[in-house]
């Protein structure tokens, strides 16, 4: 069988990978923002709970993923491909080809809101997030 994207007859599906990838992406966004904090004051609090009521002087960044959509521009690239790993069977002198799952291309959309005591501080913080 040649690796043209067709599956062999005896093909068995393996375990799914990346079940937590969306949550890990959101956590990576949080870490990216906190790691880049370069101000002389403590970093703002990051919240996902939109019902959280901050204290008066507390700066809070609300990050909420509200939509996950398939990336239709890259959708046609999906097919079963021969993996980069193959095993040579010494007894039969035959190469076993492994297939990998096609990636799922997603666009993740986030809503970002800021709470601060003064509107100008909130706008400054939002500008920092956009530049970051």
Image (spheres, rainbow, N blue to C red):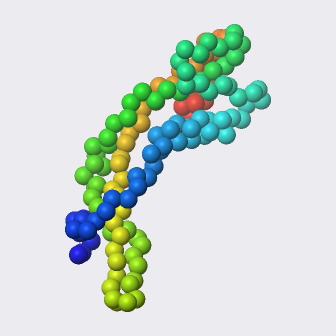
Q: Position of residue 35 (x, y in %)?
A: 67, 40
Q: Position of residue 38 (x, y in %)?
A: 71, 35
Image position of 81 (left or right of 108): left
Q: Which residue is most to the right?
A: 40
Q: Quadrant of residue 124?
A: top right
Q: Position of residue 113 (x, y in %)?
A: 53, 21
The foreground one among 103 and 118 is 103
Image position of 31 (left or right of 68): right
Which residue is located at x 41 percent, y 55 percent? 15
The foreground one among 113 and 78 is 78
Q: Quadrant of the N terminus?
A: bottom left
Q: Position of residue 68 (x, y in %)?
A: 38, 35
Which residue is located at x 40 percent, y 52 percent? 16
Q: Quadrant of residue 30?
A: top right
Image position of 70 with respect to 61: above or below: below
Image position of 132 with respect to 3: above or below: above
- Asked whether residue 123 appears in the rendered view, the answer is no
Which residue is located at x 27 percent, y 71 percent? 3
Image position of 82 with respect to 118: above or below: below
Image position of 29 with respect to 5: above or below: above
- Asked whether residue 42 appears in the rendered view, the answer is yes
Q: Quadrant of residue 71?
A: top left
Q: Quadrant of the C terminus?
A: top right
The foreground one among 7 and 83 is 7
Which residue is located at x 75 percent, y 27 percent? 42
């Amino acid at each position: 069988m040649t690796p043209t994207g067709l599956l062999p007859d005896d093909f068995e599906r393996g375990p799914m990978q990346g079940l937590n990838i969306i949550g890990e992406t959101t956590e990576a966004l949080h870490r990216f923002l906190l790691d880049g904090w370069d101000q002389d004051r403590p970093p703002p609090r990051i919240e996902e709970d939109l019902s959280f009521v901050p204290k008066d002087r507390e700066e809070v960044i609300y990050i909420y993923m509200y939509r996950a959509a398939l990336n239709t521009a890259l959708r046609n690239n999906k097919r079963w491909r021969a993996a980069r790993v193959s095993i040579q069977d010494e007894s039969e002198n035959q190469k076993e080809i492994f297939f990998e799952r096609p990636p799922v291309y997603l666009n993740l959309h986030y809503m970002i809101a800021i709470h601060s005591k003064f509107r100008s501080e909130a706008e400054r913080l939002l500008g920092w997030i956009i530049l970051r």
